[in-house]
Image (cartoon, grey):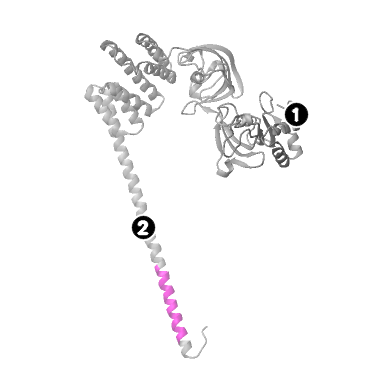
């Protein structure tokens, strides 16, 4: 990064001279910067064309740098080289955030911020082609303007790939093109797995997206594939549920509930057909295979992996309309099985809202489905929604009066409701008692204050009488 350091003062002068007003801009910039600062400038452009030069005003606090896709927070002030400010996050009193390397800011800022450490403050000088080019940004920024930014890097963090924050990606090397592996693609990757700064595996492996478990590859790596491009190298930070879960992995000396870090390079991939490219016969064939594999994962306690298989069935079949009666029944049966099994997986994972969601989808197709009603009742019971739960279990008994489990659950719900009523009575009784005690104490304090006032008034009256007697006898007031 320090290549050509001896010529840095010349670099800055050359860049400035390419501005619209050469003499004014150069003089203004040189007035703003000391000779030492100008001579310490660094060309941070990847191809070293002097398009973005940097002067560090304050060093960062650690050795880490933001990566492509990271969400960064900065404070900045932008000026034209005549010293005129055109924008500042400081004026808005709010940091500016953007995803690095995604084209959300001018190229010069993407490049400059990627060279910074957390806490660093620097000045960036950007050529027009790394800023707003020949068009400028009227009315504040003229055409071909060289821009100066003072930037402070406040923080940065990786891209979240899941809503629960279980998979975080940081891109070390950007991939090629715009194509990504899809579900069912065959991918060839290089993996490096780390746990607590220890490298526990390094290998090349091929697997089918959605079935990485068959090759001993964690689910988190599998789920990240659809976001990657050929040639990309990224860091994946996996929470335990997306790693080796509660079981850990003895062969790697990974204990239960361990977070992992994987460096993944996508060497190559072969895309699978998209759902809309498949004919119904293919969809039914693939769905039968996914159902079998989902059952296999479920029995092994790999509930998230099983969910992936059942979701594939839904993605293939949920939009199938206008087929023959027999085929439509087959499609509906597979959808019911997939969504019922997803509900069971989510029960095991304690994701009760998703249990209810999948059971509702089943009941849209079959309003008296015994399993869907029972599993939805279980979800409501676990969420302490006893009235909803008892309603579902009673519906189960309407469908199948001999369902002993549902009858038992009704009794459990009734007991829970009574327990909660008793608990509420105790809570309210204690509350009312505290209110009564508070009122009694408040009354006592009021009477005390009233007594004190009476004494004070009596003393005042005595004092007035004394003063009157004194005045009558021609004495001075004491």
Check disc 2: other Cα within 10 Å, few if <14, some if 14-19, many if 20+: few
Q: Which mark is residue 5?
A: 1
Q: Residue at x 29, y 36 (%)?
A: 417
Q: Can residue 295 be seen by looking at this rendering?
A: no
Residue on which the image places disc 2: 439
Q: Is residue 355 left or right of residue 188?
A: left
Give the quarter of the image for residue 308.
top left
Please state which of residues 239 and 7 is positioned toward the viewer in this rendering: 7
Residue 365 is a magenta residue = no
- Tell me where the magenta segment starts and ends, as one range: 450-468
Residue at disc 1, secondary structure: helix
x, y (%) of residue 111? 62, 29
Is 316 located above or below residue 8 in the figure? above
Q: Is residue 476 visible?
A: yes
Name which of mark 2 and mark 1 comes first in the sequence.
1
Task: Give the main secondary structure of the magenta stretch.
Answer: helix
The CA distance from mark 2 to mark 1 is 80 Å
Observer-nearest of 59 and 403: 59
Q: Is residue 128 left or right of residue 391?
A: right
Q: Residue at x 66, y 42 (%)?
A: 83
Q: Quadrant of residue 19?
A: top right
Circle 2: element type: helix
Q: Nearer the viewer, mark 2 or mark 1?
A: 1
Q: Give the image location of residue 309, x and y in percent.
A: 41, 16
């Amino acid at each position: 990064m320090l290549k050509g350091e001896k010529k840095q003062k010349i670099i800055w002068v050359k860049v400035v001279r390419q501005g619209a007003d050469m003499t004014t801009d150069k003089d203004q910039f040189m007035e703003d910067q000391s000779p030492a600062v100008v001579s310490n400038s660094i060309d941070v452009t990847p191809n070293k064309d002097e398009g973005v030069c940097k002067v560090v005003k304050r060093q960062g606090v650690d050795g880490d740098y933001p990566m492509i896709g990271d969400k960064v927070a900065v404070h900045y002030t932008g000026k034209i080289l005549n010293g005129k400010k055109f924008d500042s996050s400081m004026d808005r009193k709010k940091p500016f955030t953007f995803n690095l390397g995604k084209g959300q800011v001018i190229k010069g800022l993407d490049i400059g911020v990627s060279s910074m450490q957390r806490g660093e403050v620097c000045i960036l000088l950007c050529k027009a082609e790394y800023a707003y080019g020949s068009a400028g940004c009227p009315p504040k920024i003229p055409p071909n303007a060289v821009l100066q930014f003072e930037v402070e890097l406040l923080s940065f963090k990786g891209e979240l790939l899941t809503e629960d924050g279980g998979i975080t990606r940081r891109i070390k090397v950007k991939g090629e093109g715009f194509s990504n592996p899809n579900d069912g693609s065959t991918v060839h990757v290089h993996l490096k797995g780390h746990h607590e700064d220890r490298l526990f595996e390094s290998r090349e492996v091929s697997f089918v997206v959605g079935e990485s478990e068959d090759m001993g590859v964690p689910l988190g790596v599998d789920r990240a594939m659809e976001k990657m491009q050929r040639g990309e190298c990224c860091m994946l930070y996996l929470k335990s549920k997306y790693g080796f879960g509660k079981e850990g992995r003895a062969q790697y000396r990974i204990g239960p509930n361990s977070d992992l870090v994987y460096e993944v390079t996508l060497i190559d991939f072969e895309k699978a057909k998209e759902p809309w490219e498949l004919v119904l016969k293919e969809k039914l064939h693939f769905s039968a295979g996914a159902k079998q594999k989902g059952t296999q994962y479920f029995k092994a306690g790999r509930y998230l992996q099983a969910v992936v298989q059942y979701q594939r069935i839904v993605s293939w079949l949920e939009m199938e309309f206008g087929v023959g009666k027999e085929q439509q029944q087959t499609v509906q049966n597979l959808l019911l099985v997939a969504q019922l099994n997803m509900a069971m997986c989510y029960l095991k994972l304690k994701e009760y809202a998703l249990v209810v969601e999948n059971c509702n989808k089943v009941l849209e197709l079959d309003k008296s489905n015994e399993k869907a009603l029972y599993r939805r009742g279980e979800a409501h019971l676990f969420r302490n929604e006893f009235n909803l739960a008892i309603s579902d279990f009673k519906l189960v008994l309407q469908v199948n009066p001999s369902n002993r489990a549902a009858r038992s659950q009704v009794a459990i719900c009734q007991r829970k409701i009574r327990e909660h009523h008793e608990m509420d009575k105790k809570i309210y009784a204690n509350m009312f008692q505290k209110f009564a005690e508070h009122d009694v104490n408040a009354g006592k304090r009021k009477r005390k204050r009233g007594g004190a006032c009476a004494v004070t008034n009596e003393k005042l009256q005595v004092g007035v009488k004394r003063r009157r007697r004194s005045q009558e006898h021609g004495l001075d007031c004491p």
